[in-house]
Image (cartoon, rainbow, N blue to C red):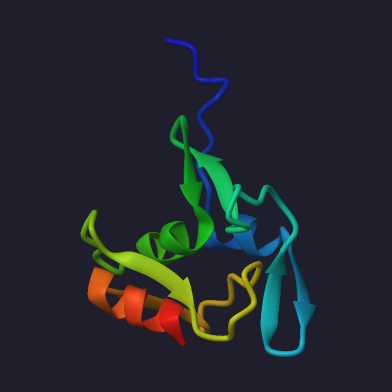
Amino acid sequence: MNNRHITYHTIESLMANTVEEGDCLLWQGYMASKAVPHVSHGGKIVAVRRLMLELRGRPLKRTDYVGCSCGNKSCISPAHTVQRTQAQHVAAMGR
C-alpha cells in the first residue's frame, strides 16, 4: 500500500500553519476555490474547520456545514468555528 499521499493531522499541526491576527488564526495553507481553508487528510482534501472540530471530538453529520462566525474566510480559530445545519448556513450567508 502506498501511503505517501496520506497525511494525519493533529490540532497542533494545523495551528502551526496559522498566523495570529487579533482574535483570528489565519490559515496559511491551501485555500479551495471558494477561499475556504483545506488540507490533505487521509488521502482526501478536507475543510480545515471541519477537521478541527472532528479532532476536538465534535460529532458531525455529513450534511452539517462548518463556518466561521468572524466573517474572515481564512480564519480557523476554534473560538470562531461554528457548526450549522443547511438552513442555518443559508440564513448566515444571506446576512
Q: Is residue 28 left or right of residue 80?
A: right
The spot of residue 53 in percent (x, y) is 40, 67
**Most foreground residue, 88 or 59:** 88
Placement of the N terminus among the 4 image quadrants: top left
Which residue reaches farthest top?
1
Which residue reaches farthest front?
94
Q: Residue at x 60, y 48 (%)?
A: 32
**Most foreground residue, 3 or 41:** 41
Q: Residue at x 42, y 61 (%)?
A: 50
The spot of residue 30 in percent (x, y) is 68, 47
Task: Name the image quarter holding residue 75.
Answer: bottom right
For residue 45, above or below residue 15: above
Task: Name the image quarter holding residue 7.
Answer: top right
Q: Residue at x 62, y 70 (%)?
A: 73
Task: Name the image quarter holding residue 42.
Answer: top left
**Most foreground residue, 17 or 64:** 64
Q: Report how many numbered discs are placed on residues in the image.
A: 0
The spot of residue 16 in percent (x, y) is 71, 61
The spot of residue 61 in percent (x, y) is 21, 60
